[in-house]
Amino acid sequence: MRLPEPYRIKVVEPIRLLPREEREKRLEAAGLNVFALKAEDVFIDLLTDSGTNAMSDNQWSGIMIGDESYAGSRSFYHLEAAVKEVFEYNYVVPTHQGRGAENTLFSILIKPGQYVMGNMHFDTTEAHIRLKKGIPINLVVDDAFDTSKYHPFKGNVDLGKLERFIAEKKPENIAFMLITITCNSAGGQPVSMENIREVSRICRKNNIPVYIDAARFAENAYFIKAREKDYADKTIAEIVKEMFSYADGFTMSAKKDALVNIGGMIGIKDDESLYNRAREVNITYEGFPTYGGLAGRDLEAVARGLKEVLDVDYLRARIGQVEYLGKLLSDAGIPIQTPVGGHAVFVDAGKFLPHIEAEEFPGEALAVELYLESGVRAVEVGTCMMGRDAEGKNIIAPMELLRLTIPRRVYTDNHMGYVAKSLIDIYGKRETVRGLKFTYEPPILRHFLARFERV
Ligand code: P71
């Protein structure tokens, strides 16, 4: 039996389910794009787990004693102490969110034309690499792209691909390696300790620095404990320290595993001159080094969240809930990325709607249908999100996915049951679902502002 969540609910926020005719009207007005809906017209919001967390009483009390001093805020020193304790890193540079950290760190590390290797970079990461004239390279294992195949660590770097890439391109043309844990783009899939260790060994042998995209570091540690030989008896805190011992630094969107609503940071293990550069660059974009675009209260909440998230009972309940939703769906025959990831169930919309071709966006079509059916908002991760190549052709995604992203500590299993039932009902009449075409297509990041009609 799954143990229930190790917390109880002290504050609630009402949500409402609009009648179907109303949902139809609102979605029409939104140009059939769920990003354009008002949040209050959504019943259960599974758009993202980013910044949608419920904070604890401990974090909320930290909010009240945040130190709002411009320079030298006490809350900054609390954050610094938390980073030393959790990651055993000496230095931290706060930023307003993850992409702020990417912008600052990448401006220092990337020389134009250099490659940035990774398992699978997240969208904003890839965008920041390109903005610094770097070339993003994804070296994830091929099994990541086969949704029906079980692999305990689908976020792993393919070590053969890594060694061949370094040999071919030469270390001096590679800025650094970035391991994203868990690997969001592959479906919230974890990276094993063995893989992190080996990637680090190969990169160090070639003098290539190793960084971690730490957005979901604790969820990754939980998977290592649950699935990797020799780690079952280690604490999450011990596993986190070992993971980060293999890297030189990290970027982090605190909006995920720091259990807050806004925030980010750069962590640096021991390179003092890199720390000084990062502080300097950060000032222009994010702010003075002891606040980095955040209020003192935000720093305080992040400091507390970083420690709270190491609770194995919390992680078991959290990932257990994602697995619960995944099981309800797969028991009903719905194709999903297997095994489920740490923060979301990824429905294989390509297989769910085989009659809709990639360029008619099966993931978007399913998101539209799910909102109409149930008021649930999910997000496409597929060809619509990919955009177009230099010749103007659609870049066909390796998988057409619909991401059901579960905010931390926000919804109950009953909410999950409702989401599953709604999708199962759609599955029963899946051949009636129609593909989409643009009535308006923005030139970049089109999925956010696009408008559609049915084919
Ligand atoms: C997610 C997000 C948030 C998001 C971003 C862009 C479009 C839609 C939703 C953000 C991540 C992430 C990883 C691994 C860096 C960022 C950027 N994820 N790395 O999954 O997942 O962090 O949003 O704090 O700037 O919904 P940031």
Image (cartoon, helix red, strand yellow):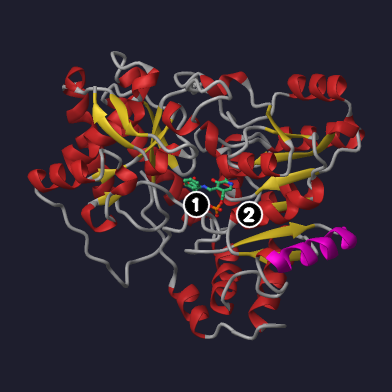
Amino acid at dot 1: Leu
Residue at 20% across / 36% down in the picture? 422
Magenta range: 271-284
Q: Nearer the viewer, residue 231 or 22?
A: 22
Name the spot of residue 307 as percent of width and height, x first: 60, 65
Secondary structure predominantly adopted by residues drawn in magenta = helix
The local crowd at label 1, few if under 14, some if 14 to 19, many if 20 or more residues have their Cα within 10 Å, is many
Q: Quadrant of residue 383?
A: top left
Q: Which residue is mark 1?
A: 315
Name the spot of residue 431 as percent of width and height, x first: 20, 17
Q: CA distance from mark 2 to mark 1?
A: 19 Å
Q: Is residue 280 magenta?
A: yes
Residue at 71% across / 72% down in the picture? 81
Q: Nearer the viewer, residue 169 or 178?
A: 169
Instruction: Say if disc 2 is inside 8 Å of ligand 1.
Output: no
Name the spot of residue 173 as percent of width and height, x first: 86, 32
Name the spot of residue 400 as percent of width and height, x first: 42, 24
The local crowd at label 2, few if under 14, some if 14 to 19, many if 20 or more residues have their Cα within 10 Å, is many
- Asked whether the viewer can see residue 160, the reply is yes
Quadrant, the C terminus: top left
Residue at 49% across / 20% down in the picture? 393
Q: Which residue is mark 2?
A: 252
